[in-house]
Amino acid sequence: MFSLFYGLWKYLVSKTEFHVLILGIDKAGKTTLLEKLKALYSNLDGLPPDRIIPTVGLNIGRIEASNTKLVFWDLGGQVGLRTIWEKYYEEAHALVYVIDAACPSRFEDSKSALEKLLRHEDLQGAPLLILANKQDLAGAVSSEELARYLDLKELDERLYMFEAVSAYEGMGIKEGIDWLVDVMERSKRTETLRIRAGVAGRVSA
């Protein structure tokens, strides 16, 4: 009887953990997004926007959403730092790609960087959430307009969604995260990583 209740308790309290990459070119608002995620889901005060500096390396944030643990890896987006992105691809369950929707002059750079990472074999099948960020600023394009501009051919066999957000105000973020959790739980990418982890565990044992 004890084992039955213990098994039920363990099932109820256990949470799946997913690793999510937050990528995008510099000044897109990635770290502001990460800090807002902490504030929205963890009852923690994230850094105020005026204290956020460009990321050099990696910022990590952990939250819980829909009984699921999410570990976010926020990587620097400057040209010289983008080469380190691929070191984190293999373990990522999903991608959040942030674009400054109020700066059309940098859309081409954002598109080029996104197309390159989507071609990488280590990210095969990873769900993709593209955020049209900075909707609080005048002139920001909608998620639909951004989708038409990017016209990404590599999305044909990948679960993806465009979402208009404001990392500064928090608008649209929970909707995007709810979608991400839902698709990660049933994606082939997650199943692949689970199988790989199981094989690795048996080998190390």
Image (spheres, rainbow, N blue to C red):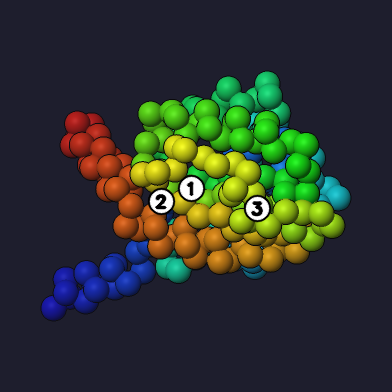
Question: Where does label 1 land, which residue?
Answer: 128
Q: Residue at x 53, y 61 (%)?
A: 177
Element under label 1?
strand
Question: Where does label 2 land, which residue?
Answer: 159
Q: Nearer the viewer, residue 132 or 184?
A: 132
Discs 2/3, front: 3
Question: Does residue 36 appear anywhere in the picture?
Answer: no
Question: Where does label 3 land, which residue?
Answer: 145
Q: Residue at x 56, y 54 (%)?
A: 162
Q: Inspect the image, locate mark 2, and give the three-letter code of the amino acid beneath it.
A: Leu
Location of the C terminus by quadrant is top left
Image position of 103 (left or right of 93): right
Q: Earlier in the sequence, mark 3 or mark 1?
A: 1
Location of the N terminus by quadrant is bottom left
- Within-10-Å neighbours for mark 3: few <14, some 14–19, many 20+: few
Question: Does residue 109 appear anywhere in the picture?
Answer: yes
